[in-house]
Amino acid sequence: MRPQPTLTVLGIETSCDETAAAVVRAGARGPAAVLSSVVASQIAAHAPFGGVVPEIAARAHVEIIDQVIAQAMRQAELGFGDLDGIAATAGPGLVGGVMVGLSAGKAIALARGLPLIAVNHLEGHAVSARLGGEVDYPFLLLLVSGGHCQLLDVAGVGRCRRLGSTIDDAAGEAFDKIAKTMGLPYPGGPALEALAEGGDPSRFNLPRALLGREGCDFSFSGLKTAAARMAQGVADPVERRDLAAAVQAAIARQLAERTERALAVYLHAHGGGDRRLVVAGGVAANGEVRRALTEVAEAAGFGFSAPPLAYCTDNGAMIALAGAERLAAGMIDGLDAVARPRWPLDEAAALAHPTHNPGRKGAKA
Ligand code: KG4
Ligand code: ZN
């Protein structure tokens, strides 16, 4: 379903270490148009600590949110009066940061008499592939970021069924933690991918978690421990490159193997019709991950879509598009919408499997 008629929405994202705002115009036909997208990264502020520090993140969002929103409006060459709605991430994420963006969104909505859409950050990632081209519902989604790793059957906005999730770390978290043990800078994913370039992944033998195991869940903790142990004995630059390549290949392989199972579950549920696999979230930027997923999608007769690189990691455009789709369906929120540290996309599945929500940073599942 495409939003009808054309809706112009400001999206605000502050759930982790990116302060972002964007204006998106979504109409009845064709892919949504991104009129502006501003992302102010806090990577430099967190880098000395090797990870995101919640208090630093919240303060940094407060300091810059007004400017980021103003810049997004300026780039779109629009005033608030030209908007149909304000979408803001309401969770899951670091709640201090979420409150900053959600409060800013509420203030604009109240001052301008515009509808507020409280968007689930995961739903933003879920719709992000629709920013790059024609990707229609339904599709199978692999959502892989720093805080989340799950497979979802996405029938439409607000209609997701979780098929599997991580039982320990998220894939991006595994990239980040292993990269840290190898002395690479934060965020580790892109740094590890750069180091792995041209490496020989077969030189190191890493464990294959859950291989052949029923279901579509993930597990990266064994890989993390094994890689950390190996990293201690590796100093030679070529060996380091090969270890990075082996880690990247192991993560990509597990993502592909578990996705392959989910493709079968999805097919069973949907029978004929469109077959599409979508990957989203920061780890979707990884070339080896994309390659491995393309391979399993093709083998199962599925098309494969990934968002443009700029929309893989956190951004405001995906929140604006999720907001536009919700607005078109009449799904708006009151100014009493709360910031939620945890907020699973498929609440029924999360309640049925609460052990899948062990994360400190928010709902991994
Ligand atoms: O979606 P995102 O920006 O934030 C969350 O919602 O978590 O994802 C950030 C995660 C980090 O763990 C980062 O290391 C990972 O995505 N990431 C990558 C790459 N680019 C970002 N992992 C592997 N390869 C990449 N090229
Ligand atoms: Zn994210």
Image: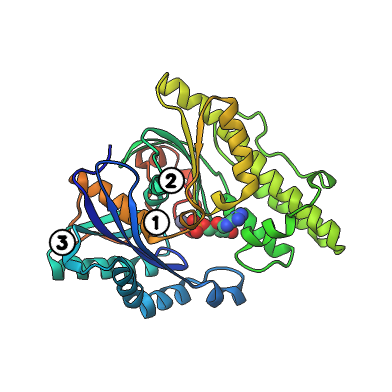
Q: Can residue 336 be seen in this view?
A: yes
Residue labelled with disc 2: 129
Of labels 2 and 1, earlier in sequence is: 1
Closer to us: mark 2 or mark 1? 2
Q: Pinpoint residue 244: horizontal percent, then vertical percent.
A: 74, 55
Q: In this view, does 362 lie above or below 47?
A: above
Q: How crowded is mark 2: few (under 14 residues within 10 Å), some or many (20 or more)?
A: many
For the residues labelled 2 and 1, the Cα–Cα distance comes to: 20 Å
Cβ at disc 1 under 8 Å from ligand 1 = no
The residue pinned by badge 1 equals 92
Q: Where is residue 300 in the image (x, y as percent from the top left)?
A: 56, 25
Mark number displayed over residue 331: none
Q: What residue type is labelled 3?
A: Leu
Query: Is there any visible trace of residue 360 in the rendered image?
Result: no
Dot 1 amino acid type: Pro
Say if 294 sits above or below 168 in the image.
above
Please tell me which residue is depicted at 42% across the width and 50% down the height of the picture.
125
Q: Is residue 160 left or right of residue 53?
A: left
Mark 3 or 2 closer to N-term? 3
Tell me the number on the disc at residue 114: 3
Q: Where is residue 215 in the image (x, y as percent from the top left)?
A: 55, 30
Q: Residue at x 39, y 59 (%)?
A: 341
